Image (cartoon, rainbow, N blue to C red):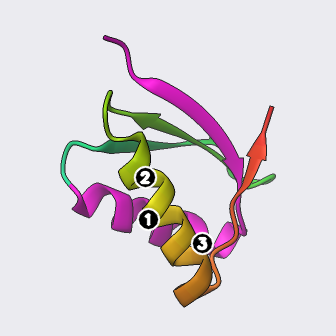
Amino acid sequence: METIKLSYRVERKDISYLSWIIQSYEGIAVVKTIDPYKAIIELQISPGCEDIIFELLDGLKKQEGVISVPVN
């Protein structure tokens, strides 16, 4: 199975924080900065971990105000 790749636009100030949080959940996803100026990141999600990532992003939005907007 291949990883699932999803791109998001976030606030520039949140790139490092979001990366650190996601990487602390070892093995569920890798965060790659696609464009640091436009603040676009790519999440490379391990198969079967999609629900965990979506819950984590939702929690970060509600508790920390980290907004992630999907990019096509």
Q: Label 1 crowding class (10 Å Cα cut-off): few <14, some 14-19, many 20+?
A: some
Residue 14, numbered label? 3
Pair 1/3: label in front: 1
SS state under label 3: helix
Q: Label 2 crowding class (10 Å Cα cut-off): few <14, some 14-19, many 20+?
A: some
| Marked residue nearer the N-terminal end (1 or 3) | 3
Left or right: where 6 falls relative to 24: right
What amino acid type is highlighted by mark number 1?
Answer: Leu
Q: Locate the N terminus by quadrant.
A: top left
What amino acid type is highlighted by mark number 2?
Answer: Ile
Residue 47 x %, y %: 32, 27
In the rendered image, which residue does mark 2 sit on? 53
Whether residue 51 appears in this view of the structure is: yes
Q: Residue furthest left?
A: 26
| Marked residue nearer the N-terminal end (2 or 3) | 3
In the rendered image, which residue does mark 1 sit on? 56
Residue plotted at (46% across, 62% down): 55
Residue 44, numbered label? none
Question: What distance separates the C-alpha of mark 1 from that of mark 2?
Answer: 5 Å
Q: Which residues are magenta?
A: 1-25
Circle 1/circle 3 CB separation < 8 Å? no
Pair 2/3: label in front: 2
Image vertical order of residue 4 relative to residue 71, above or below:
above
SS state under label 2: helix
Residue 26 x %, y %: 18, 51
Image vertical order of residue 5 relative to residue 38, above or below:
above
Question: What distance separates the C-alpha of mark 1 from that of mark 3?
Answer: 14 Å
Left or right: where 72 falls relative to 64: right
